[in-house]
Amino acid sequence: MPEASSGPVRSGGRPRDDSRDGAIRRATLQLLAELGYDGVTMDRVATRARAGKATIYRRWPSKVALIMDAISTVADDTLPIADTGSFREDMLSYLSSFTTYVVDDRGKILAELVSEMSRNEELRSALRDGLLAQRKSVIEAIVTRGVARGEVSASVDHHLLSELGSAILLQRLLLFGEAVSEEFIVSIVDGLIVPFATGIPTSSTPAAQPSRTPEKREPIDA
């Protein structure tokens, strides 16, 4: 039997058992991938996670809150902020991690949520303030370090720069259903992101940079 958390006692006198949170989040993500946004209910999550519905509501006041917490927790684990000492290398690392994040069931979930956003203001706000803000904070950290090292122009549009790579990858993976290879990611970084970040046209940037050689890997299937 799981050991109860030593945290503060919640209303009702019972200590919170944090070991249940992971099971509830996993159940939520599984149901999202299997049934879509509309198919996720607190009842189904409770049944899948073998948890009481009251337990779920004590932690998450709404379905949107539960879904966003489950997705954001996974993103924390799979979208680390790389710090290689190089803006280019950091972007390559981030976009590789981002691609891995999108190609499995989480990509199906993301596509489902994006589709639902147009009909659900609460979900749209939660995505904007949660997962999308989280992704942008990763890019912002990479860009800020690049500016401090003199690799990135101080006048660069941070917002536009944050959209360049991920927007192309999302279009290729989710809209077109095409595979993404390491070579494709390198072409985005070297052909678009680095020239835009530095203000130097592609023809003026080095044709090949020895800091990273594309790995010989199979394409990442959508």
Image (cartoon, rainbow, N blue to C red):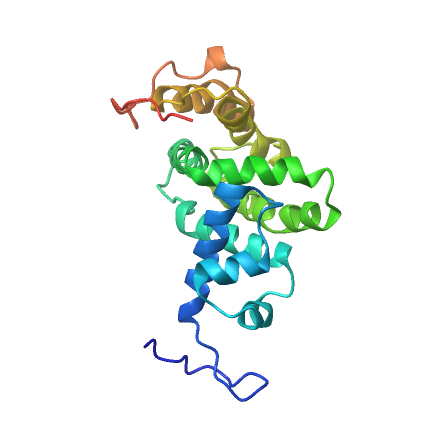
Of 90 and 201, which appears nearest the observer?
90
Task: Give percent across and percent down for residue 108.
Answer: 50, 36
Of 141 and 80, which appears nearest the observer?
80
Residue found 56% across the figure and 32% down from its top: 153
Q: Is residue 129 above or below residue 117?
A: below
Question: What residue occupies the far left of the structure in this picture?
Answer: 216
Q: Is residue 1 above or below residue 105?
A: below
Residue found 56% across the figure and 42% down from its top: 36
Question: What residue occupies the far bottom of the structure in this picture?
Answer: 13
Q: Is residue 35 above or below residue 72?
A: above
Task: Give percent across and percent down for residue 152.
Answer: 51, 33
Q: Is residue 123 left or right of residue 149?
A: right
Tell me the quarter of the picture where residue 216 sits: top left
Q: How many tags in the picture?
A: 0
Locate the N terminus by quadrant. Answer: bottom left
Residue found 57% across the figure and 43% down from its top: 136
Tell me the quarter of the picture where residue 155 sits: top right
Residue 95 seen anywhere in this rendered image of the structure: yes
Task: Give percent across and percent down for residue 139.
Answer: 52, 41
Residue found 60% across the figure and 45% down from its top: 37
Locate the C terminus by quadrant. Answer: top left
Question: What residue occupies the far top of the structure in this picture?
Answer: 203
